[in-house]
Image (spheres, rainbow, N blue to C red):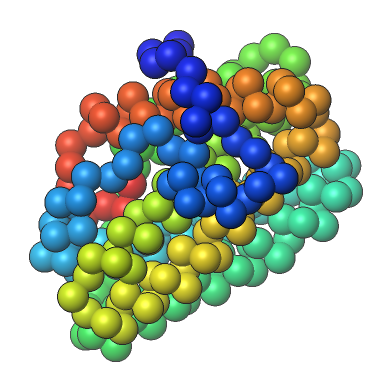
């Protein structure tokens, strides 16, 4: 269900990636600035959650490749992302170890679970395929936005630079999933459904508690 009216200013323009990125990747509700302060007070927890987010991103790409293995371009484009996301997991794990912090247990992700509830379950396979790609794009976009907040708001200079590099990488992932969707599905349909995802995500973010021990 769409809960907000369309916002023309947030319409995605694949041909103008930099403009979309400057507009917080098209996201309709920015992260509360207080989130960075909470995250800084829960560094072990936020790094743990971040590590598991990277692991889940790699696993999700593997699952998409397995499910849609006949889509040759998708397989070719996503295969390097699996390696990159797993590399990010190792980077975050190394950061935990360097700071004598522990990798905690993986927790339920209320944000992703609510996105999954919006994902189409039945009907034509291409509609489900589209939702899978757009949900991945949205998670990457929100991650990128959160990394941007950390890169600008953390007191630790090394971590600011650490998250700046990750922010740039996640922005590329976000656009890749959108571009893949447009290779297989009508561009106008992709954009209309993307707008619905943006509106739903804004509602979800607005309802979730502000927590410093979660990336999302």
76, above or below 95, in the image: above
Residue 110 visible to an observer of this rendering: yes
Instruction: Answer with the quarter of the image where residue 133 lies.
Output: top right
Residue 188 at x, y = what percent? 73, 23
At 11% from the left edge and 65% from the top edge, which residue is drawn?
Answer: 41
Q: Is residue 123 left or right of residue 19?
A: right
Residue 208 at x, y = what percent? 23, 33
88, above or below 195, in the image: below
Residue 76 at x, y = what percent? 82, 57
At 45% from the left edge and 55% from the top edge, which residue is drawn?
Answer: 144
Q: Is residue 139 left or right of residue 207?
A: right
At 85% from the left edge and 42% from the top edge, which residue is drawn?
Answer: 71
In this orientation, which residue lies closer to the viewer: 139 or 172?
A: 172
210, above or below 101, in the image: above
In this orientation, which residue lies closer to the viewer: 149 or 104?
A: 149
Where, quadrant-wise, is the N terminus in this rendering?
Answer: top left
42, above or below 35, in the image: below
């Amino acid at each position: 269900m769409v809960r907000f009216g369309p916002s023309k200013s947030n319409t995605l323009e694949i041909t103008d990636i930099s403009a979309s990125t400057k507009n917080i990747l098209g996201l309709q509700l920015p992260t509360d600035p207080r989130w960075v302060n909470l995250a800084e007070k829960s560094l072990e927890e936020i790094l743990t959650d971040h590590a598991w987010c990277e692991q889940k991103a790699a696993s999700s790409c593997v699952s998409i490749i397995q499910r849609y293995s006949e889509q040759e371009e998708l397989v070719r484009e996503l295969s390097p992302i699996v390696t990159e996301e797993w590399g990010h997991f190792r980077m975050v794990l190394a950061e935990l170890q360097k700071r004598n912090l522990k990798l905690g247990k993986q927790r339920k992700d209320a944000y992703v679970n609510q996105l999954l509830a919006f994902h189409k379950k039945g009907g034509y396979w291409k509609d489900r395929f589209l939702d899978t790609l757009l949900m991945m794009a949205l998670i990457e976009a929100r991650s990128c936005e959160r990394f941007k907040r950390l890169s600008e708001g953390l007191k630790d200079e090394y971590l600011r630079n650490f998250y700046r590099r990750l922010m740039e990488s996640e922005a590329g992932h976000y656009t890749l999933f959108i571009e893949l969707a447009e290779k297989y599905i009508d561009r106008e349909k992709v954009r209309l459904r993307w707008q619905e995802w943006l509106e739903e995500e804004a509602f979800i973010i607005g309802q979730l508690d502000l927590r410093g021990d979660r990336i999302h």
